[in-house]
Amino acid sequence: MNAPLDFYFDFSSPYGYLASHRIDALARRHGRRVRWRPILLGVVFRVTGQTPLTGQNLRGPYHERDFARSARRLGVAFTMPSTFPFPAQAASRGFYWLSERDAEASVAFAKTVYHAAFGEGQNVTDLDRLETIASSVGADRAEFRKALADPMMKDRLREETDSAIARGVFGSPFVFVDDEPFWGHDRFDQIDEWLQRGGW
Amino acid sequence: MNAPLDFYFDFSSPYGYLASHRIDALARRHGRRVRWRPILLGVVFRVTGQTPLTGQNLRGPYHERDFARSARRLGVAFTMPSTFPFPAQAASRGFYWLSERDAEASVAFAKTVYHAAFGEGQNVTDLDRLETIASSVGADRAEFRKALADPMMKDRLREETDSAIARGVFGSPFVFVDDEPFWGHDRFDQIDEWLQRGGW
């Protein structure tokens, strides 16, 4: 039984959104499962000294163009949310709460949150919107809403982010195939090749 | 007659080295030529606020691993030079001096400099080594040596770097297909696809 791929992402990451459309099928082709692991890039950036892409000279305009170009290539809807980057704490905590109850529902939740944020440009820091999405994948609204402020979920997200940093994660998406790290949506073809060839 | 691809690179860039093995064949497949254009990333970084990859927390170790992994995938020799990053002024000025006399010789010079630096880990800031490489592609040693300190060549390199920044170049390699920008060696398959499909 092969280990699942670890798929680290921030809900506020456009390339993470694009990757979310590919990671499950990619893993399935090679008989692997995926462990979806949202983290907070803002915490990671304090370690690397990086800042959000879109605020950077030269890099910002390139990447805004590239988000849309990469989405067109995949045939995926793309709209920048009006607030970007946005704090993804609530979505991430909600994800982990769901994942401890129903892994499949948590992945459906993640995909729907991502679609709302970058497919439709909606504000997914809005707790009512998150609650509606959670409800659409089968969660109890009141329990879900309570979980968003649950100290255990805060701890879980902090631990996930810290352990990602300890493994060397510095961006989103970031994938481990066993212990082999791949950063970036544009490495997904190489992940495919790595799984096919068993490395090189 | 289609416009040549603009291939911007810094001689001190490992991903530029990898790209130098692919760019000519990539262009040729689509009936294009390549304009090789060395620039100084140090100047670019003053605009973007970036710093050399290998000195960065988390990003440094990942990329050192990835340089070697990407080279293995291409079947290309790879050795980190003991001084990295290194100042590429002399190699770049020498390149432009050659390119004004014999474009083909200047590309052969660029490939040989890159191979010395990252294939063999040699120090290509050494002027005697550069002179020997220039001589191997047909240049007169004394004239080449004089060109390295020629104010016109200093100006040429400065202008190339400034005009690259004005076009939005912020890394190495950086390729323009007509006016479409592509950053990074890991986008070369997309450049191929872009040329094939005429964009998307």
Image: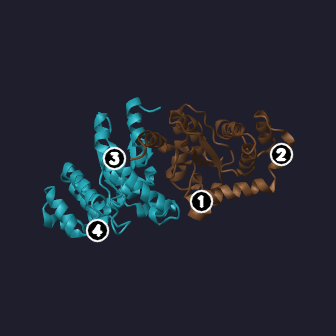
Chain colours: A cyan, B brown
Q: Is residue B25 above or below residue A121?
A: above
Q: Is residue B65 above or below residue B161?
A: above
How many residues crowd around disc 1 within 10 Å: few (fewer than 14), some, or many (20 or more)? many
Circle 2: element type: helix
Q: Where is residue A59 shown, x and y percent of the image?
A: 50, 59
Whether callout 2 and callout 4 share a subunit is answered: no
Q: Nearer the viewer, mark 4 or mark 1?
A: 1
Circle 1: element type: helix
The residue where tag 4 is placed is A125
**Image point (50%, 36%), residue name:** B30
Tag shown at residue A74:
3
- Residue A9, quarter of the rendered image: bottom left
Tag shown at residue B82:
none
Q: Nearer the viewer, residue A188 or B180?
A: B180
Circle 3: element type: helix
Task: Tell me, yes or no, whether the two marked residues, 4 and 1, touch with CB atoms within 8 Å.
Answer: no
Q: Amino acid at mark 1?
A: Ile
The residue where tag 1 is placed is B165
**Image point (35%, 69%), residue name:** A83
Q: Amino acid at mark 4?
A: Thr
Q: Nearer the viewer, residue A168 or A53?
A: A53
Q: Amino acid at mark 3?
A: Leu
Q: Nearer the viewer, mark 4 or mark 3?
A: 3
**Image point (41%, 31%), residue name:** A198
